[in-house]
Amino acid sequence: MKPGIRINTGILFFLFIYPFSCLLAQENYPRNYFRSPIDTVLKLAGNFGEIRPNHFHAGMDIRTGNHEGMKVYAVADGYVSRIKISGIGYGKVLYITHPNGFVSVYAHLSKFNDTIGKYIRKAQYSKESFEVELFPKPNELPVKKSDLIALSGNTGNTAGPHLHFEIRDEKTEFIINPLFFGFDIKDDVKPKITAAYIYPVDEKSRVNNQNSFKQLPFSGKSGEYKTLPTDIVTVSGNIGCGIEVWDTESNSSNHNAVFSIELLMDGKRIYYSEMDKFSFDQSRGVNSHIDYVEKKIHGRSIQKSFVAKNNKLNIYKELKNRGIMSFMNDSIHNMTYVIKDYFGNTSTLKFKLKGSSTSYDKNTPAASKYTAIFHCEEPNQFKTQNCSMSLPANILYEDLRFQYSVSNDSVKKGSIAPIFHIHNDLVPVHSYYTLALKPNNPLPERLQKKALIVSVSPGGGKHSEGGEWKDGFITTQTRIFGNFTIALDTVPPYIKPKNISKGKDLSKQRTIEIIAGDNLSGLKSYPAYIDDKWVLMEYEPKKNLLYYTFDSSIKKGKHTFLIEVKDERGNASTFKANFTR
Ligand SMILES: [Zn+2]
C-alpha cells in the first residue's frame, strides 16, 4: 500500500449522518431561563469557538472593566456542584448545576461569598493544600437565582481581568454556545473575511501548476468580497479551501469567532460547520481544523474547509467527500464562502476555480524520506535502542510518514542524552502517547529521581515533559512531536521574601508574600507554617507569587514563619523568619 494515501471508508458515514445533525441546533435551549452573571451591559472580550492554543474557547469572556472585583451572580437556581482552586487553567472556578439539566461555569474568580469561601477554606486546611477540587452535594451549597456568589478576578491562565462564563450540558458535559440561551448581546456587525487559500490535498494535485497552497487575492466591503475576473486559480486533482475570518459584536473591537462557515461549489454545499457545541475530548481537534503549520510558523488561524479523516470534531454538520473537491476536467466553477455570526449577520466571498485536465501529475511522486508509516486509526509502536514510542489508536488526525533521527552534535548544555527528533512539531497530536528515552550513560541511583524528559523549542528553550526512571529509560506521557532530550534538575527552587524579613514587625501588613519559582521541573509544593501550624499560601504563577493573608487566628505577639518550596524532582528550599504581629 502506498504510504499516506489510503482509501477512506469514513466518507460514506459523513455523507449520511451529517446532514441530519444540524436540524436540531437552536430550538432545544431555553432562551429566558438564565439571567446575566453580571449587572452591567454584557461586553465580550472573547466568544464561543474562538481558536486558542490547542483548544476552542469554551465560553464567553465577559469584560469586567479591566479590573477585578465585579459582582458575579448565580444565573439561575441550583447548587454549587464543583469548585476548583488552581494557579493555572480556570484559576478559581465555580460550577452551578441547575434543575433544567445545564451547568453554568464562572472562571478566573478572585473571591467567593462567605458561605462558599468558608467551605473552600475548610477543605484547603483539612487537605493542607491551596489547590483543591471539590464536589459539594446538592444540599451543601444551594443557590438562588441572582445570589451573589463571587467576585470576578484574574486567576489562572488569563491575559487580564475578566469573567469566563460557560454553559454545559450536565449529562453529556458538552459545552454549549451560550448565545443559544438568549443573553443580551447586541451584534449588527458582519463577519470580516481577511484571507482565503486554495490547497492541493495530496502530492499529485496542483494549484496554479504547483503542489503548494495559494492565497487568493480578493477585495470587497460591507460583507461582499470577490476576486477580480482575471484572478482565476487553476486547479487539478484533489483540492480543498481555507479561510481566515473573524467577527465582533456592536461596540466592540475584539476579533471573535464566527458561528458558521459554508462553502458552495456551483451552488451545492461542499462544507458546512457550526459552532454550536463541542466536548472537551474534541477541543484539541482545533489543531486539525486549522492549517496547523501556518499557525505554528506565521501565527495565522486559517480554518480549513476540508477535514482530516481522523478529525472527530462535531462542528462539521455537512460535508461532501470531507470537503475535498476533485478536478479532473477542464471546467470553470463558481465558488462561494458564506460566513455568518450567531445573529445571522452574513458575509460572502465569491471566486472561481478553473479545473484543468493537464496539470495533474499522473506519476506517483517520489515519497519523501521517512522512518515508518503510522496509520492514524491504529495503535503505533516505534522502537530503537535508545527510544521507544507507543501511540494509542486515533491520536493522529491523518496517516503519517513518521520521521525519526538523533543528533549528537546539538546536545545542549545540561542535557545527558542526544537530541531525539521525534518527527517535528508541525504535526499535531490529539492525545497522550508514551515516550521513553535512554540517557547517554546509565544514571547512578541518586540522579535517577532528578532526570526528566524535556522538549526543546527551536530557540533552544527547554520545557519539562516530566517522566520517571524505569529500566534504564526515562518514560513520560506527552502529546506533542518535536525535539526531546533528557535533563537533570538538581537545582532547588528560588525563594525571595517580598515583605517579610527576620524580626520584622508585620502588625500593619495584611499578607506575607514570597517570590518563588523553579528553573526546570516546576513547583510541586509550598507548605508554610506559622508557629508550626500549616497556613494557606495562595499561588499566583503569573507573578511567581506565594502569599498568606492574615486572619484572626494569628494573635498579637511573636511568631515564626517557615516555608518549604519543593520542585517536581524533590529539590527543596526553605525560608524561616521570626516576626511580630
Ligand atoms: Zn475564557
Image (tube, rainbow, N blue to C red):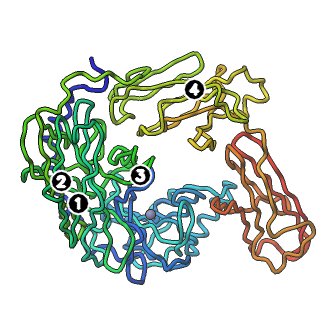
Q: Are marks 3 and 1 in contact (CB under 8 Å)?
A: no
| Residue bearing mark 2 | 231
User: Which badge, 1 or 4, is on the more N-terminal residue?
Assistant: 1
Foreground disc of the pair 2, 4: 2
Name the kind of residue labelled 2 in the image. Asp
User: Which badge, 2 or 3, is on the more N-terminal residue?
Assistant: 3
| Residue bearing mark 4 | 436
| Residue bearing mark 3 | 55
Foreground residue among 169 and 451:
451
User: Which badge, 3 or 1, is on the more N-terminal residue?
Assistant: 3
Name the kind of residue labelled 1 in the image. Phe
Foreground residue among 484 and 490:
484
| SS at badge 2 | loop
Q: Are marks 3 and 4 in contact (CB under 8 Å)?
A: no
**Residue visible at 77% across and 39% down?**
490
Rendered position, 343 above or below 391: below
Name the kind of residue labelled 3 in the image. His
Q: In 3D space, how far apart are the residues under numbered discs 3 and 1 (Cα atoms)?
A: 30 Å
Q: In 3D space, how far apart are the residues under numbered discs 2 and 3 (Cα atoms)?
A: 35 Å
User: Which badge, 3 or 4, is on the more N-terminal residue?
Assistant: 3
Residue 92 shows up from this direction: yes
Q: Position of residue 572 (x, y in %)?
A: 79, 46
Describe residue 21's horizontal placement relative to residue 377 as left or right: left
Q: In 3D space, how far apart are the residues under numbered discs 3 and 4 (Cα atoms)?
A: 26 Å
Ligand 1 quadrant in view: bottom left
Foreground disc of the pair 3, 1: 1
Label 1 CA crowd tier, 10 Å (few <14, some 14–19, many 20+): some
| SS at badge 1 | loop
Name the kind of residue labelled 4 in the image. Ala
